[in-house]
Image (tube, helix red, strand yellow):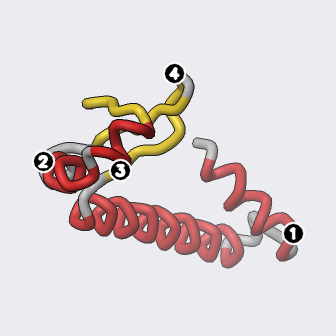
Amino acid sequence: METLTSNQAKTQFGDLLLKVQRNPVEISRNGKPVAVMLSMEDYESLEALKMQQLQQKIQKSEADLIEAKIHDGDTLFQSLIEGENN
């Protein structure tokens, strides 16, 4: 992944917009990565993937609830949070 400094991103913004249509670009400030710029298509794909994973977790939690593996809402939400880390 290409990396630009925040100053380069600012001064070369038009070029940056063209670059992100091909590949994500990392933006750094003071030598540390602070952001990634990506195309709208890549962003929408990422969001769709996140939604799909959330729906799968909800379906699993609903199945657990039906099978009496989960007894209350707090446990349900905790299992969703823990599932994000797996």
Mark 4 vs mark 3, CA separation in Å:
17 Å
In the picture, the quarter occupied by the N terminus is top left
- Assign a secondary structure to mark 1: helix
Q: Is residue 63 left or right of residue 6?
A: right
Marks 3 and 2, how far apart in space? 11 Å
The relative height of residue 44 versus residue 38 in the rendered view (above or below) is: below
Name the residue type under label 3: Met
Q: Pointer 4: residues within 10 angstroms few (<14), some, or many (20+)?
A: few
Which mark sits nearer the N-terminus, 1 or 2?
2
Q: Is residue 69 left or right of residue 61?
A: right
Please state which amino acid type lies under the numbered disc 1: Asp
Which residue has dot 1 on it?
74
Q: Is residue 69 above or below residue 25?
A: below
Q: CA distance from mark 1 to mark 2?
A: 43 Å
Residue drawn at the location 22% of the way across and 65% of the way down: 41
Tag shown at residue 22: 2
Local SS, label 4: loop
Residue 68 appears at what percent x and percent y?
76, 71
Asked if disc 4 and disc 2 are in contact, CB closer than 8 Å, the reply is no
Residue picked out by circle 4: 31
Which residue, given by chain and number where applicable, does mark 3 sit on?
A: 37
What separation in Å lies between label 4 and label 1 (alpha carbons)?
41 Å
Residue at mark 4 to residue at mark 2: CA–CA distance: 24 Å
Near-viewer residue (69 or 85): 85
Q: Quadrant of residue 73?
A: bottom right
Of mark 4 and mark 1, the one earlier in the sequence is 4
Q: Which residue is found at the position 54% from the left and 26% from the top?
A: 32
Please name which of the two marks, 4 or 2, marks the residue nearer to the observer: 4
* Disc 1 + disc 2, Cβ < 8 Å: no
- How far separated are the C-alphas under marks 1 and 3? 36 Å
First in sequence, mark 4 or 3: give its number: 4
